[in-house]
Image: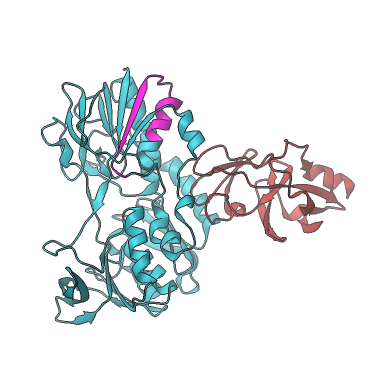
Chain colours: A cyan, B red
Amino acid sequence: MKTVTVVGASLAGLNSVQQLRQQGFDGRIVVVGEEAHRPYDRPPLSKALLAGRADVDDLWLCDEEDQDELGAEWLLGVRAEQLDAAAGRVRLSDGAEIDTDGVVIATGGRAHRLPGIEDMRGLHTVRTIEDAIALRTELTGGAGEVVVVGAGWIGAEIASTCHELGLRVTLIEAGDVPLSRTLGDAMGSVFAALHTDHGVTLRCRTRVSAITNARDGDRRRVTGVWLDDGTQLPADVVVMGIGMRPATEWLAGSGVAVDDGVVCDPGCVTELPSVVAVGDVARYRAAPGGTARHEHWTNAAEQPTTAIRNLLAGTTVQHYRPSGYVWSDQYGVRLQVAGELDRPDEVEVIDGSPSDRRFVTAYRRNGDTVGVLAMNNPKLFTRMRKQLANRIPAS
Amino acid sequence: MISACAVTDLPPGESVRIQADVPIAVFNADGNLYAIDDTCSHQDASLSDGWLEGCFVECPLHAALFDLRTGMPSCLPAKKPVRTHMVLVHDGHIYVDTNAHERVPQPAAEPATASAGEAVA
């Protein structure tokens, strides 16, 4: 293998380059990044950067010197438009073509928007630096009422940041409680209380049916939202935190299978041993019998270790084992999750109390602790996370 | 010089956070005592809540590793070192010298040891 092209220059792409060098690859590495920026950290986009507690220069994942040391060619502000895997060629939006032996797909995804709703002023998603700066400009520029659609991790963090900035916030959630799919209803209720105790209005079991708007110069501007229960809420700003869609359009006709992500084996290898996928875009086969795709920082940081090993070996020699570690900061409390929180048969608070905003909850299956959720207790959480890492079976 | 705790209150594998002009974390790594700035140089997290392994501490938030002897990070996402501080043991009590702030990074120094402290006591 002489040339490896890493498509995507965010955390998973950068870590893939680091892993290539760390695992002894001394050939040519080309990195293609659609965004003009060098690799940056996205979690602060909904927190410190949005709140104004950090600026863009705090976000770079490595300094220029460390980046240079990796000895890669960085093609930034240019998009990969086509992969011809059989010929070993990646075609770019500027017309250039890269002949390559290996490909690492790290294209992440785009923020999902409500279907059928046109782009207009005051309507936001948060995925990039530009997104966060544009939203911050509006939030600090005289907006009063904010509606956040979706009370998942990102929606909750944005609601918390808007509250920190002194805005009136309404949070819209389709489920019974926030995060019920991830944490279950009991723990989801704890997060519902976190919002409402801070004066944020939480409306569950409802969806947005329309965005009301008015003419504003040559464009239109948000004036509010209609909910499917008939409620009309005024809004100066509407932020959609309703998930992302993997960026896989460029793989059409490539021979790489796509199904809500790049389809790969348990070692993040596609049907072609010279093409691997990492980060938000990778849908890998996971036990038992299903597939998994993770949209989290830690996954993007950890997955390249396995994927690059398999790419360099030319075959799958290692299966990926996710740590399932996720963190979030909301309303000044720190939340941490690790392991598997789905399908528990027992959920028990084992330390502290949710009402004190300091607790640890164990998620168990057949008596075994398989997952842990903590609020403001990083010490016990870390101890349990380490135990889980050693216990989760490789199957 | 700031008083941290009694030697007996910091057994091997444990850590304590003390308040100086900035918070400082004191560790007992297999009998050797170390003190570093408590706040991770990457993002806001308390290293005294971290995972101690040998003479390294892993940040509880993003798993950045810091060498307790030098304060240097040994992996991303941390890029900058944390300051180290001298630890002294007297009469069974642990003290931290916070005047050594400016020496960053510092060469690996001979650590104070918990057992030496007990010998003094």
Provide the residue span drawn in magenta.
A15-35
Q: In this rendered view, identify the residue nearer to me: A44 or A57.
A: A57
Q: Position of residue A171 (x, y in %)?
A: 29, 73
Q: Residue at x 30, y 41 (%)?
A: A77
Look at the image and tell me in which quarter the N terminus of chain A lies. top left
- In the image, taking residue A191 as reference, residue B69 lies left or right, namely right
Q: Give the tally of numbered discs.
A: 0
Which residue reaches farthest front? A217
Which residue is nearer to you in this view: B84 or B63? B84
B15 relative to A114, above or below = above
Picture quarter containing residue B53?
Answer: top right
Instruction: Determine whether, in the image, residue A306 is placed left or right of residue A329.
Output: left
Does residue A324 show up?
no
Closer to us: A96 or A364: A96
Which quarter of the figure has residue B113?
A: top right
Residue A48: x and y in percent read 45, 60
Position of residue A142 measured from the top left corner of the image (x, y, whole percent): 36, 76
Q: Is residue A80 visible?
A: yes
Q: Quadrant of the C terminus of chain A?
A: top left
Taking the spot 39% from the left edge, 27% from the top edge, the residue there is A20
Instruction: Answer whether residue A173 is magenta in the image.
Output: no
Q: Which of the pair A319/A210 is nearer the observer? A: A210
Q: Is residue B52 left or right of residue A158?
A: right
Quarter residue A207 falls in:
bottom left
Residue A292, position as x, y percentages in the image: 25, 44
* A31 part of magenta stretch: yes
Q: Residue at x 26, y 22 (%)?
A: A100
In the picture as drawn, the residue positioned furthest to the top comes out as A2
